[in-house]
Amino acid sequence: MSLNPLHGTPFTIPDDDPQGCTLIGGVYRNFLFLHRGRLPQHAFDYASRWHKAIRQKQSPPPILFDLAGYVNQGIPMVVLKNLCISSQKSKMSGPDDVVLIGTRRINLRIMWPGYSNTNAWVRVVNVPSSGFTRAQLGQRVAEALSSFVDTMRTQPCTSSKYTIAGIRFDQVVLVGLYHLFDDNWQLDIAIDRL
């Protein structure tokens, strides 16, 4: 697994971590909701020597998503997917914050455990020249993840704990997006186990 030298691997849960928290930026972040746990992911590994040689010196900060009044807890995907932007504003922290200014497009990557063919799963999102608001980006991410879930639901999974067939979309929580390299961003996802 290649690591971005400016960021630790924000997606991997330590094997001996009983609480399901994740190391992000050197700090363990626990969820306030005891039934919520992070989906363990490895950062997407780009093998191209050319990409490694020209990668950016400075990565943009992560784009985090939260319910209004909470910090580092994420926001349910159903809020992002099923509510119009104006309805999301009352439920989301910083919904009008402009993100991705100066970015033409992003490639959203998901590395869902147990699905070996997800290395190739990527969705291109074109970004307007004025950027997205956090609410608009959240809605685009939710649409992409919904497409991923629909595509992978019938695929075999080697991890019974994380099989998509056993997880409802209303259990999926978007915590953030992390920059990997170039236009590639990876979703940080949590799952609510009720």
Image (cartoon, rainbow, N blue to C red):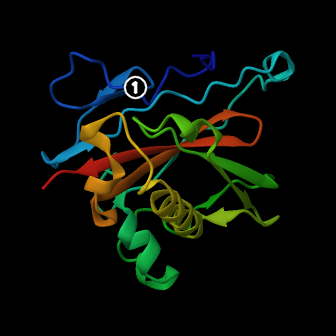
Tell me which residue sits at (26%, 31%) in the image: 21
Q: Callout 1: 10 Å neighbours few (<14), some, many (20+)?
A: some
> What is the x, y in percent for residue 106?
72, 51
State whether residue 44 is above or below residue 107. above
Task: Specify the quadrant that holds the C terminus.
Answer: bottom left
190 sits to left or right of 65: left
Q: Residue at x 75, y 55 (%)?
A: 101
Residue 30 appears at what percent x and percent y? Answer: 23, 36
* Nearest to the observer: residue 68 or residue 135: 135
The image quarter containing residue 24 is top left
Along the viewing direction, whichever of 11 and 118 lies nearer the viewer: 118
Compared to residue 147, the image places residue 163 above or below, namely above
Q: Position of residue 174 (x, y in %)?
A: 41, 54
- Quadrant of residue 38 within the rendered picture: top left
In the rendered view of the protein, which quadrant contains the N terminus?
top right
Query: Label 1: which residue?
Result: 12
Give SS at disc 1. loop
Q: Is residue 90 left or right of residue 119?
A: left
Q: Residue at x 42, y 83 (%)?
A: 87
| Amino acid beneath label 1 | Thr
Asked whether, in this view, residue 87 is left or right of residue 183, the answer is left
The reply to whether residue 89 is visible in this rendering is no
Q: Which is more toward the observer, 150 or 5? A: 150
Can residue 186 be seen at all in this image of the molecule? yes
Location of residue 76 by image quarter: bottom left
x 63%, y 24%: residue: 45
